[in-house]
Image (cartoon, rainbow, N blue to C red):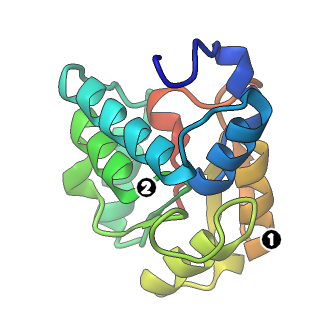
Amino acid sequence: DKHMGRLEYHDFLDFIGWAEIPFWRELRKRFKIKLKVKQLADLRSKAYQRLLRKSRLKPFPGVLQFLKALKKAGKPYAIASSSPRVQIRATLSSSGLRPLFKVYVSGHDDVKRGKPHPDAYLKAAKLIGINPKTAIAFEDSDSGAQAAQAAGCRVFRIGGETGCRDFNRFSFL
């Protein structure tokens, strides 16, 4: 990119699951990026939305059936994500899952502190009317697992050791 040079996937591994602003603060410092944190976050969101408009994400096997079973059983569920709301919506739309989610909480837009702090999980649990200690969180990152555990949730890790790809970047309560 003209603003920061080329960063490779391995440059981001330490930051998977981080809240947006701390993520960009650290990358900016580490790679001596000139743009301001908000500019970087906005550029990323715009690029992410453009990319998803051109593609179709495929949920992990079993996710659609699992969500439909939860809905049919009347069990509440939500997303607690580090991502900005626009990125959450874009991912849900691209994966075809947007109609199944009434509640999603952004660690960037909806709470003061993003992951690894528990705020997004606590807010999501409150919005769907459950005690987080009775919730199960599916997480793909260390910071997300820390956030879910700090909120009192039981945590199941999903995805590979290197973190998120496509839809598994979201956490379900």
Above or below, 116 against 88 in this view is below
From the image, tell me which residue sits under label 2.
Answer: 84
Q: CA distance from mark 2 to mark 1?
A: 21 Å
From the image, tell me which residue sits under label 1.
Answer: 150
User: Picture coordinates of residue 81 (x, y %)?
Assistant: 52, 56
Q: Quadrant of residue 111?
A: bottom right
Mark 2, other Cα within 10 Å: few <14 / some 14–19 / many ≥20: some
Label whose residue precedes the other's in the sequence (2 or 1): 2
What residue is drawn where x is 37% and y is 50%? 88
SS for callout 1: helix
What residue is drawn where x is 69% and y is 60%? 115
Q: Quadrant of residue 123?
A: bottom right
Residue 152 seen in the current view: no
User: Picture coordinates of residue 112 (x, y %)?
Assistant: 60, 77
User: Picture coordinates of residue 45 (x, y %)?
Assistant: 37, 42
User: Picture coordinates of residue 109 (x, y %)?
Assistant: 45, 68
Instruction: Identify the image quadrant of the C terminus.
Output: bottom right
**Which amino acid type is shown beneath numbered disc 2?**
Pro
Near-viewer residue (118 or 126): 118
In the rendered structure, are the residues bearing label 2 and label 1 in contact, judged by CB atoms less than 8 Å apart? no
Near-viewer residue (15 or 93): 15
SS for callout 2: loop
Q: Classify residue 112 as left or right of residue 39.
A: right
**Which amino acid type is shown beneath numbered disc 1?**
Ala
